[in-house]
Image: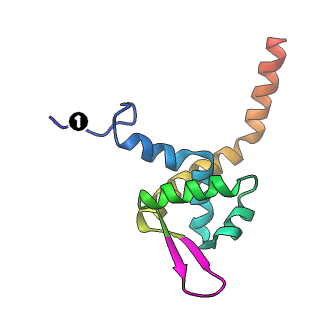
Amino acid sequence: MVLAPSVYRVDCPSRPIFEHVTSRWGVLALVALLDRSYRFSELRRHIGGVSEKMLAQTLQALERDGLVHREAQPVIPPRVDYSLTPLGREAATHVRALTRWVESKVPDVLTARTEYDANRA
């Protein structure tokens, strides 16, 4: 019997995909690449705070999942461009909606935090 995919099951293959797409750096890379392709160093500068190692690991995981396309240009110095695949564009559209919602709710969340902290004191 084959079980339907469920991110709630620890052994489900959807779980690592979900983790790659919804990780802090995964979300930011996908949303950035929704606008255009980037060279690695450009993307790293665009995504504030990400280390070279974490961005490389994130892009590699997203590439392995079929969400990001990596294209090495045969030029000197070497140039590598990252873009979204059709599957990656679909995922990025969903996570961009979440990022926009989060950005729009910052005042509400900050108010809730202040009230929570005041009630706990």
Please check the rendered image and state whether residue 80 is part of the magenta-colored stretch, yes or no. yes
The boundaries of the magenta stretch are 70-82
Q: Position of residue 47 (x, y in %)?
A: 71, 58
In the image, residue 77 sits, relative to residue 93, either above or below, namely below
Left/right placement of residue 74 relative to residue 51 reads left
Q: Determine the image quadrant of residue 53.
A: bottom right
In the picture, residue 4 is in which quadrant?
Answer: top left
Indicate whether 52 appears above or below 71. above
Q: Residue furthest bottom?
A: 75
Which residue lies under the disc numbered 1?
3
Overall secondary structure of the magenta section: strand
Which percent across, then down, holds residue 64?
43, 58
Viewer-closest of 41 and 97: 41
| Rendered view: 15 above or below 78 | above
Total tally of numbered discs in the picture: 1
Task: Residue 91 in the image: state x and y as whole percent.
Answer: 47, 56
Q: Nearer the viewer, residue 37 or 92?
A: 37
Q: Residue furthest left?
A: 1
Q: Give the residue type that dot 1 points to.
A: Leu
Q: Is residue 118 above or below residue 21?
A: above
Secondary structure at numbered mark 1: loop
Residue 115 magenta-highlighted: no
Q: Residue at x 57, y 54 (%)?
A: 57
Q: Residue at x 57, y 66 (%)?
A: 34
Q: Residue at x 18, y 38 (%)?
A: 2
Side of 15 relative to 27 (left or right): left
